[in-house]
Amino acid sequence: MKKLINAPENVLYESLDGFAAAHEDTITLAAGHKFIRRKTLTPGKVALISGGGAGHEPLHAGFVGRGMLDAACPGQIFTSPTPDQIAEAIKDVDTGAGSLLIVKNYEGDVMNFEMAAELADGQVMTVLVDDDVAVAKSTYSIGRRGVAGTLVVEKLVGAAAEEGRTLEELHALGQAVNSRTRSMGVALGSCTVPAAGSPTFTLADDEMEMGVGIHGEPGRRRVKLRSADAVAAELVESIIEDLRPSNGRGCLLFVNGFGGTPLVELYLMVNAAKRILCGHGISVTRFLTGSYVTSLEMAGCSITLTELDTEFTRLWDAPVRTAALNWS
């Protein structure tokens, strides 16, 4: 194992210290490395809190800031944050309008965020993200997994929260965004969790894993290596079959790298996916390309499609200032 680390048990804390130093103008790291929060909160705004295991950076800490999250709770690599972390984050960033938890559909995350919500004093609601069409359930999840679509939910709901919408309105919006978002990924190689010291799984040089999860858990099946066009076709066709987008609506095409795939390949996948979508009469009106929901250094990518309307498009375009997403 070759990694830029000092000791496996300190990777998360040393990384968080570096992240906080690099972005001290916009975020603050809580004592004990329990959560990252916005440096300046907006009184009377519904607080948005998310989190999950480390190793998926910039998800979720990279999306704390204006137009997205108020706080993010990091767990150890591929491990859920604890209920007390989440409860403290809720207490710290709730300015009186309640809190909305945005939770990926993994068993540990769901359980710990539910426990934290029960501990909280203020009003708390939860949006569960389950955008992965690859498998109905896995060893990590209760039902379909929450993957790269989490970013889309956080962005659109975050923009609406800045407008002053109520907790109930934001909860309904988050559910609507999730219902119109689907994802599927492919792995060309495994990642190595520092504490384990060996690859999570093994693929032959001529193999790929279709529908892989963001922790390296199995997908639909293992297949022989094929062209980018063929991979994009299977991912996009699976998404369209499940999402069944309405005729005449545009979509957001989000091609996400898992940490070990260069941008030149991700943009090649954008080109392939856009061509396939156009063949189905689906226009792409917004794009996002890059490694935003990663799996350490895993090679591969995912494709996410969100069906847009006028409101969703406006919320996507709304200003955002975070470490990982920043536009005005």
Image (tube, grey):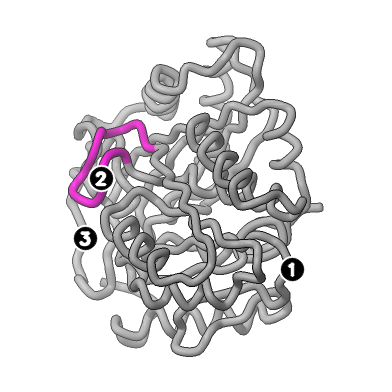
Q: Is residue 9 above or below residue 127?
A: below
- The CA distance from mark 1 to mark 3 is 43 Å
Q: Mark 3 or mark 1, which is nearer the start of the sequence?
A: 1
- The CA distance from mark 2 to mark 3 is 25 Å
Query: Which label belongs to residue 199?
Result: 3
Amino acid type, residue under disc 1 in the picture: Thr
Q: Is residue 12 left or right of residue 307?
A: left
| Element assignment for label 3 | loop
Mark 2 touches mark 1? (CB < 8 Å): no
- The CA distance from mark 2 to mark 1 is 34 Å
Given this view, does label 2 or label 1 mark the residue nearer the observer?
A: 1
Residue 167 x %, y %: 61, 52
**Residue shown at 26%/54% (left/top)?**
107
**Residue shown at 38%/62% (left/top)?**
113
User: Few, some or many C-alpha atoms within 10 Å of disc 2 (few <14, some 14-19, many ≥20)?
Assistant: some
From the image, tell me which residue sits under label 1.
42
Q: Is residue 193 left or right of residue 294?
A: left
From the image, tell me which residue sits under label 2.
142
Q: Is residue 37 above or below residue 203?
A: below
**Residue shown at 23%/37% (left/top)?**
207
> Is residue 133 rendered magenta in the image?
yes
Residue 9 location, quadrant: bottom left
Q: Which residues are magenta?
A: 132-144
In depth, the one of 216 and 108 nearer the eye is 108
User: Few, some or many C-alpha atoms within 10 Å of disc 3 (few <14, some 14-19, many ≥20)?
Assistant: some
Q: Mark 1 or mark 2, which is nearer the start of the sequence?
A: 1
**Residue shown at 40%/27% (left/top)?**
235
Residue 169 location, quadrant: top right
Amino acid type, residue under disc 2 in the picture: Ile
> Is residue 61 rendered magenta in the image?
no
Residue 277 appears in view: yes
